[in-house]
Amino acid sequence: MSRRHLLVLSALTSFLTIHAATPQAPVRPAESIGDLLLKDDFQSVERRLQSAPRTAETLAYQGEVEFRKGNFEKARTLYQSALQMDEKTARAHFGMGKLALAKVKSKEALASFKRAIQLSPDKVGPHIGLGLCLSTASHVQDALDEVRIAKRLQPDSSQVQAIARLLEKRLAASN
């Protein structure tokens, strides 16, 4: 994989991190855990999670905090603990996909993003993640299909539009 591709993957992984916490449904009450993550307010998130019941979802959120801090092994442990508690925790599958994508482990990332989509098909991040994995495996048309789904889910997102344009250029260049 070229240096340029790794830089693009790195930038897009940051995008995925933000969209893992972004609400996809109607607006949530102010200062939800997702809102705090978007502001990188890790201390408030950690305080809120400490007082919350220990569930697979709270473990996955803790994993997200560690991922955002750059503590990837700790994030992996938390995501895995969440999945041991409840295998259907989409946020944990999405987190595992981001970790695998960051380490250029395409097969693991593909499996994690596909599972996250099965569990939460209305979330943008897993579709983008799957699209990125498919594009690195030279399945650009399939990648573009996933990004088109993300565009339907968030038609006003400039980030989703930018990723779609990038993949469309790549598809045109490969033909």
Image (tube, rainbow, N blue to C red):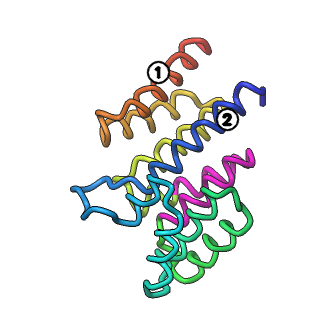
Instruction: Work out whether mark 1 precedes mark 2 in sequence or the reverse, and give the earlier one.
Output: 2
The magenta-colored residue range is: 91-114
Q: Find residue 59 and report its horizontal and vertical position in percent.
A: 54, 76
Left or right position of 6 against 41? right
State the separation of the CA atoms marked 1 and 2: 18 Å
Q: Residues within 10 Å of mark 1 (few under 14, many from 20)?
A: some
Indicate which disc residue 137 carries: 2
Q: Find residue 5 and report its horizontal and vertical position in percent.
A: 70, 28
44, 57: nearer the viewer: 44
Amino acid beneath label 1: Arg
Indicate which disc residue 116 carries: none
Left or right position of 63 against 165? right
**Residue visible at 53% across and 68% down?**
43
Magenta-drawn stretch contains 119: no
Left or right position of 15 against 158? right
**Residue visible at 72% across and 25% down?**
4
Amino acid beneath label 2: Ala
**Residue where numbered disc 1 is placed:** 165
The quadrant of the image that shows the N terminus is top right
Above or below: residue 85 compared with residue 2: below
Q: Find residue 147 and report its horizontal and vertical position in percent.
A: 44, 35
The quadrant of the image that shows the C terminus is top right
**Residue visible at 52% across and 46% down?**
16
